[in-house]
Amino acid sequence: MTARVFSNVQIATMEGGNYGLISGCVAVNKGLISHVGPDLPSDYDGWPTEDLQGRLITPALVDCHTHLVFGGNRAREFEMRLNGASYQEIARAGGGIVSTVSATRAASDEELIKGAQRRLDALIAEGAALVEVKSGYGLDIETELRMLRAARALGARNTVRIRTSYLGAHAVPADYKGREDAYLDEVCLPGLRAAHAEGLVDAVDGFCEGIAFDINQIDRVFKVAHELNLPVKLHAEQLSHLGGTALAARHGALSADHIEYATEADAKALAVAGTVAVLLPGAFYTLRETQAPPVGALRKHGVAMALASDCNPGSSPLASLLLTMNMGCTLFGLTPAEALAGVTCHAARALGVSDTGVVARGKRADLAIWDVEEPAELAYRIGFNPLHRRIFGGEG
Ligand code: DI6
Ligand code: FE
């Protein structure tokens, strides 16, 4: 039954990035939201109606930054870090991202899909309906394409929408060590063109960091993205300040992600460009970082802040948006309302997707129904999932 009414609900509409709380009804028809309000117009007389007994409806959640598809795991590095090695030391010694690259290259297509499916299941179980998935653990053309095809396959097999980001500029593979520009010329950029030709790319991402690529190299990648009419986003200022945030803003990026080391001037640049700041507390927590992103400056300049899991085997083995929200509040000082906006409307914007992220007439009927009394409960609990039901395209 696609046409129906949910009555006796509290609705956090999230319009304008605020709770926008309404007590009333939501009607859905043909996969879209057709009505939101305190009362039900008489046109809905006779429609199937479900009394939700005061439960909370929010937009379905959006995870706008994940590396869900990969081979292997890096539990041993977790152990090494707790025995004193740093994330960068492990990366330089041939561990880190490039060790996941070996495991990803060795995995079959079906193994890649199967591994990611379990992580996707965890996100969906907490109400996610739109999930971004990056490549970046292939670092050769064929494996980058295989990762993106696996991401598309996940979208086809599940009641979830997947957006892909090409992250060929994630790390320098061992055979190109010290020859970053040759890697871009011979692998990353031709791989981007090939992936785009196959319809596998929704956005182009990069890792701008001392252990990855500098701003001139990322600039080269972004120029090709523009030529292909693809939006860009960037891992910037995670471990040091290299100017990636300003570069992302100059390129009109959808988002600048991590940005622990960003400055107030960077925040201003993001505001002017309309670029979303995607904060990733799971990586901050896992790496036991101490430099938090400049939330005060982002707020002051009106930068939209999203939150995402950054689900990946190294720096953020996290497949929970509810825990991400809690960490966003506890570690970064976001308010529960900012955290909810971070995984709904602002996350959708970080993906350039405008048909979801708010509960409003005409938007997709992707909704999460929660057994909570007030929206702050979503960020407040730790390790507890109060999802009652997820509605995807009006179904569920
Ligand atoms: N930043 C991250 O947090 C992930 N990638 C990136 O550029 C980490 C990836 C990894 O350690 O495997
Ligand atoms: Fe990441």
Image: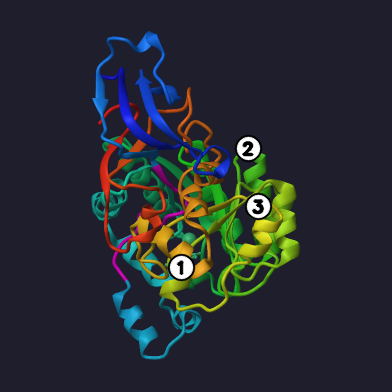
Q: Secondary structure at mark 1?
A: helix
Q: Is residue 64 above or below residue 212?
A: above
Q: Would you name the residue on which mark 1 appears? A: 330
Q: Classify mark 2: residues with Cα within 10 Å, few (<14), some (14-19) or many (20+).
A: few
Q: Would you name the residue on which mark 3 appears? A: 303
Task: Report the number of discs.
Answer: 3
2 vs 3, front mark:
3
Q: Secondary structure at mark 3?
A: loop
Q: Residue at x 38, y 9 (%)?
A: 42
Q: Classify mark 3: residues with Cα within 10 Å, few (<14), some (14-19) or many (20+).
A: many
Question: Percent from the top left, x then y, of residue 331?
Answer: 48, 70
| Magenta span dominant secondary structure | loop
Question: Percent from the top left, x then y, of residue 210?
Answer: 60, 74
Q: Would you name the residue on which mark 2 appears? A: 229
Residue type indicated by callout 2: Asn
Residue closest to the eye, 205 or 33? 33
